[in-house]
């Protein structure tokens, strides 16, 4: 079995793109989690207890 592709430049590029996409998805998920938490706090009667600046 020929394994030279896995050490090639193009294979590295493909792996790097996959890693970058995974990191971007995790970051987007983190942002949505924070925004959802803020929404839940603002939905409570009386609104958020204190505001961070």
Image (cartoon, rainbow, N blue to C red):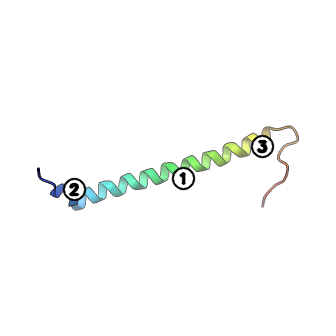
Which residue, given by chain and number where applicable, does mark 1 sit on?
A: 27
Q: Residue 46's spot in the image, x, y percent?
A: 88, 41
- Crowding near the residue tagged with mark 3, few <14, some 14–19, many ≥20 C-alpha atoms within 10 Å: some
Q: Which mark is residue 46?
A: none
Q: Quadrant of the C terminus?
A: bottom right
Q: Residue 9's spot in the image, x, y percent?
A: 23, 62
Q: Residue 41's spot in the image, x, y percent?
A: 77, 43
Residue shown at the point (47%, 54%) measured from the top left: 23
In the rendered structure, the answer to whether residue 25 lies left or right of residue 15 reads: right
Which residue, given by chain and number where applicable, does mark 3 sit on?
A: 41
- In the rendered view, would you say 33 is above or below 17? above
In the rendered structure, the answer to whether residue 25 lies left or right of residue 51 reads: left
Task: Looking at the image, tell me whether mark 2 or mark 3 is earlier in sequence order.
Answer: 2
Q: Secondary structure at mark 1?
A: helix
Q: Secondary structure at mark 2?
A: helix
Of discs 1 and 2, which sits in the foreground? 2
- In the rendered view, would you say 49 is above or below 43? below
- Crowding near the residue tagged with mark 1, few <14, some 14–19, many ≥20 C-alpha atoms within 10 Å: few
Residue shown at the point (30%, 54%) measured from the top left: 14
- In the rendered view, would you say 20 is above or below 48? below
Residue shown at the point (74%, 40%) measured from the top left: 40
Considering depth in this image, is 16 or 2 the residue closer to the camera?
A: 2
Q: Residue 25's spot in the image, x, y percent?
A: 49, 48
Which residue, given by chain and number where applicable, does mark 2 sit on?
A: 6
Residue shown at the point (82%, 47%) measured from the top left: 48
- Crowding near the residue tagged with mark 2, few <14, some 14–19, many ≥20 C-alpha atoms within 10 Å: few
Q: Secondary structure at mark 3?
A: helix
Task: Looking at the image, tell me whether mark 3 or mark 1 is earlier in sequence order.
Answer: 1
| Occupied quadrant, residue 5 | bottom left
Q: How far is mark 1 from mark 2, CA to CA?
A: 28 Å
In the rendered structure, the answer to whether residue 13 lies left or right of residue 51 reads: left
């Amino acid at each position: 079995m020929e394994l030279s592709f896995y050490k090639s430049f193009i294979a590295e590029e493909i792996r790097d793109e996959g890693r970058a996409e995974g990191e971007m998805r995790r970051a987007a998920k983190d942002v949505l989690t924070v925004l959802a938490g803020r929404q839940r706090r603002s939905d409570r009667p009386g609104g958020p207890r204190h505001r961070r600046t």
